[in-house]
Each structure stands twice: as structure tokens, then as C-alpha cells.
Image: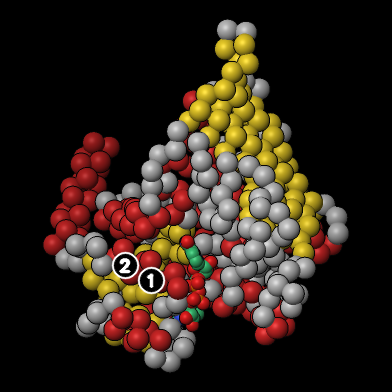
């Protein structure tokens, strides 16, 4: 068989499989029917080519109530991800569990030949992220990590500006954000369910915003700090929440990246300040200021400003905000995942990038615990 024959044969096979997919609806399972599962299901319900056929939750009756609320019928319910994946023939799952269950659910699904849309942060530890990637490689199935801010036209604009060369060589990035008071409760504030606090919950967005823009360079070292003065205090929390709070509510770090790039980072669920600052990208030809938002959730808080020189003058160019609504971003996140399955496209948010995001988060926590700078540990995949 010549190379041309081989290409043609592969193409014909892909077209045949796409037609098959187009004829049948993708069978979707939801693992974890808590808060974020609502956004997933609302978006799946808008898609004409999927059917939600199974739901699993550890809390008895929770998945049943969830399906009833959305008027979804013909669904099989399971007490955990394992029993669901054992018995159901699924095309894809959304993993919407708390962080410490991300790895086991995702690995089990991939091992059973099921595509996975995994909520952020990827995992609680970087070892788990690497284990997931080994399962992904072995299975050949699609894995995408649920960073919906990637779908935001304003976020994409940041990357376009960097890629245009308008900033020149980038040497320093200041990023992060946070809330004056905005500690979530439920499963977010305990190590056994969340693994990490603000650092993982909203820190992963800040890191992704800038690292995606600059092409996800390899992280080298980190000097990190974490604290939880607000989360553990009954001045700011209900006594029962303060008593079980054992994750971070504030983190700061100085990170060195390959390519002589410095990342100065801070994130907060609670502090006596509205924001620890805008995101700033400094380059040899220009700089970009990206306004922060009050409730830091990975969006652009207002028009960005490009600082540069023009005809010998120091000038600023305002980049107007492009309107996006948050439910629209979720629809794009779900649709891009489904299209990647159907048309065999690369994952919209690949694990190969988010491994570095997770490695930085881990290194910050590790450095904070050790009280010194550490090398960023990136396991072999
Ligand atoms: N993308 C976003 O904007 C966004 C927003 C909020 C939360 N999240 C992420 O979504 C995830 C879930 O957050 P949440 O607020 O929905 O949490 P939640 O605690 O409300 O819901 C998680 C549910 O998963 C269930 N669960 C845990 N392990 C399970 C297993 N093995 N099998 C079946 N069910 C299991 C729990 O019983 C619980 O009902 C977290 O990782 C969080 O970081 C993402």
C-alpha cells in the first residue's frame, strides 16, 4: 500500500465513523451530580446529538432528585462511578466530582474506553494527573479538562496579542486575583474532598490564563506561601465550617519557567483587599494589563490596555471587552468536547498542558510546607 493509499483509506474510515456518529446519539454519563453537574447537564440538554443515559452519585437519592429536577427520564442511576462504568455502554462521561475523586473516576472511564470531560482543577496531586495521562495514552480516548474560560473570546484575545509579537520577548508575568470575601463551603474546604483550596479552585484559572497565552513553558522552580487565616476563623466563618476548614484560602508564589520567564502569582478566597492586582505581562516591545474581577473566576474584568512605543512616543491602546455570557462558555465547553469526539479533533484543553498547571500548584503547596524554594516536580508520563 502506498502512502497515498494509506491516507485515503484512513480518510474513508474516518468519514465512515463520523457518519455512524451522526446517525446515533452519543450516550453520556454524569459522575457526581452536585453543583457543577448542573452546568454540564444544562448544556448537554441543548445538544441535539447526545442523550444522558446514566448518572452516579455517592449520596443516596441525589442523582435521582437531580434528574427529576431537569425532567430527564430513561436514566439509570448508580451509587458510584465504578458500578455505572461496569454496567453501562457509554460514549463519554463528565467527571463532576470533588477534586480528590477526579483521578479514580477518570482513569476507570478511560480504561473502559470512554471519553472524558474532567472538571478543573485536573486533580488534587500531580502524581494523580500523571496517572490519568498514562491511562489516556493507553486508551487512545479523548480527555479534555474543563477550563471554560478558554472558550472566552477575551481570553483568546490575550493569546492572539502575545502570538502577534506585539509584546516582544516576554520576561515577567504577574497574575492571580481573588476575592475580598468569597470562601465557598460544601466540599471545597476540606482536604479529604478538595485536596487544595483557593490555590486549586481559582488559582488554576489564573495560571491557565497566562500560561496558555505564552505556550505553556515548562515550570522549573517555585517559592510558595499559603495560609488560611480567614477560613479557620469564626470571625469570618460559621463555627462548623471553620472547624472543618483545612485547606488554603490564600496563596502567593514566585515561579521560574523555561525560557527565562518569571511568574509572580497570588490568589485569594478571602483577605482585607478587593484584589491583589491585575494580570500584567511584560515584554521587550510592549506590556499588557488585564484587569482583574471581584469574584475571580478566570474572566477578563474590563478593557485590556496595551502599553507600547509608537513613533518615539509612549502610547496605550485600549482593547475593548468582547461580550460573553458564562452559560455560553459552558455550552462551548460541552460542544467543543463533543465535536472533538465526533470529528477526532485534538482535545480542546489537553492534559499535556494542564499537567504543568497542576505541577505548579503542587510545587507551591510543597514549597509552602517546606518553607523554601523547590524544584517543580513533573512526573514521567
Ligand atoms: N468549571 C467551573 O466553573 C467549576 C465551578 C465549580 C466547581 N467546579 C469543579 O467541579 C467539581 C465539583 O464541584 P461541585 O461544586 O459540583 O462539588 P459538589 O460537592 O457539589 O458535587 C460533587 C458530587 O460528586 C459526588 N461524588 C464524589 N465522588 C463520586 C464518585 N466516585 N462517584 C459518584 N459521585 C461522586 C459527591 O457525592 C457530590 O454530590 C470540583 O472539582 C470543582 O473544582 C468547576
- The answer for how far apart the CA atoms under marks 2 and 1 are is 6 Å
- When asked about the image quadrant of residue 242, the answer is bottom right
Q: Which mark is residue 38?
A: 1
Q: Residue 97 placed where, x, y %?
A: 49, 74
Q: Residue 283 placed where, x, y %?
A: 64, 27
What is the quadrant of the N terminus in the image?
A: top left
Which of 163/300 is in front?
A: 300
Label 2 neighbour load within 10 Å: few <14, some 14-19, many 20+: some
| Residues under numbered marks 2 and 1 in contact, where contact means CB atoms less than 8 Å apart | yes
Position of residue 335 in the picture relative to residue 314 (left or right): left
Q: Residue at x 39, y 91 (%)?
A: 61
Label 1 neighbour load within 10 Å: few <14, some 14-19, many 20+: some
Say which element carries label 1. helix
Q: Residue 287 placed where, x, y %?
A: 62, 28
What is the quadrant of the C terminus in the image?
A: bottom right
The single residue placed furthest to the bottom in the displayed view is: 60
Which residue is identified by label 2?
42
Give above or below for 283 relative to 228: above
Residue 200, visible in the rendered structure:
yes
Position of residue 103 in the picture relative to residue 321 (left or right): right
Q: Residue at x 26, y 56 (%)?
A: 342
Give above or below for 373 relative to 287: below
Label 1 lies in ligand 1 vicinity (Cβ under 8 Å): yes
Say which element carries label 2. helix
Q: Residue at x 57, y 41 (%)?
A: 291
- When asked about the image quadrant of residue 100, the answer is bottom right
Residue 111, visible in the rendered structure:
no
Q: Residue 33 placed where, x, y %?
A: 41, 78
Which of 128/180 is in front?
A: 180
Give above or below for 364 relative to 169: below
Q: Residue at x 65, y 67 (%)?
A: 197
Amino acid at each position: 500500500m502506498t502512502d497515498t493509499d494509506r491516507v485515503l483509506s484512513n480518510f474513508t474510515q474516518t468519514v465512515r465513523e463520523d457518519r455512524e456518529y451522526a446517525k446515533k446519539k452519543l450516550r453520556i454519563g454524569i459522575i457526581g451530580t452536585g453543583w457543577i453537574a448542573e452546568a454540564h447537564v444544562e448544556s448537554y440538554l441543548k445538544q441535539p446529538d447526545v442523550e444522558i443515559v446514566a448518572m452516579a452519585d455517592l449520596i443516596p437519592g441525589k442523582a435521582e432528585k437531580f434528574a427529576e429536577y431537569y425532567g430527564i427520564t430513561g436514566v439509570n442511576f448508580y451509587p458510584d462511578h465504578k458500578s455505572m462504568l461496569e454496567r453501562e455502554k457509554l460514549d463519554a462521561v463528565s467527571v463532576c466530582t470533588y477534586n480528590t475523586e477526579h483521578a479514580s473516576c477518570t482513569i476507570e472511564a478511560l480504561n473502559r474506553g470512554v471519553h472524558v470531560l474532567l472538571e478543573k482543577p485536573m486533580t488534587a496531586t500531580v502524581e494523580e494527573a500523571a496517572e490519568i495521562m498514562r491511562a489516556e495514552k493507553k486508551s487512545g480516548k479523548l480527555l479534555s479538562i474543563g477550563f471554560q474560560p478558554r472558550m472566552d473570546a477575551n481570553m483568546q484575545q490575550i493569546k492572539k496579542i502575545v502570538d502577534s509579537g506585539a509584546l516582544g520577548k516576554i520576561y515577567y508575568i504577574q497574575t492571580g486575583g481573588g476575592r475580598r470575601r468569597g470562601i465557598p463551603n460544601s466540599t471545597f474546604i476540606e482536604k479529604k474532598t478538595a485536596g487544595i483550596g483557593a490555590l486549586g479552585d481559582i488559582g488554576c484559572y489564573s495560571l491557565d490564563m497566562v500560561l496558555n497565552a505564552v505556550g505553556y513553558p515548562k515550570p522549573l522552580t517555585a517559592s510558595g506561601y499559603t495560609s488560611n487565616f480567614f477560613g479557620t476563623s469564626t470571625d469570618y466563618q460559621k463555627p462548623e465550617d471553620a472547624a472543618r476548614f483545612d485547606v488554603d484560602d490564600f496563596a502567593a508564589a514566585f515561579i521560574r519557567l523555561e525560557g527565562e520567564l518569571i511568574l509572580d502569582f497570588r490568589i485569594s478566597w478571602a483577605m482585607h483587599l478587593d484584589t491583589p492586582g491585575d494580570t500584567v505581562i511584560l515584554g521587550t516591545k510592549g506590556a499588557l494589563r488585564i484587569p482583574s474581577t471581584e469574584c475571580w473566576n478566570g474572566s477578563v474584568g474590563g478593557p485590556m490596555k496595551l502599553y507600547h512605543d509608537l513613533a518615539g512616543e509612549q502610547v496605550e491602546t485600549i482593547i475593548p471587552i468582547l461580550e460573553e455570557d458564562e452559560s455560553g462558555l459552558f455550552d462551548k465547553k460541552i460542544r467543543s468536547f463533543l465535536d472533538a469526539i465526533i470529528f477526532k479533533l485534538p482535545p480542546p484543553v489537553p492534559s499535556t498542558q494542564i499537567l504543568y498547571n497542576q505541577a505548579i500548584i503542587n510545587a507551591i503547596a510543597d514549597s509552602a510546607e517546606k518553607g523554601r524554594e523547590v524544584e517543580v516536580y513533573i512526573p514521567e508520563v
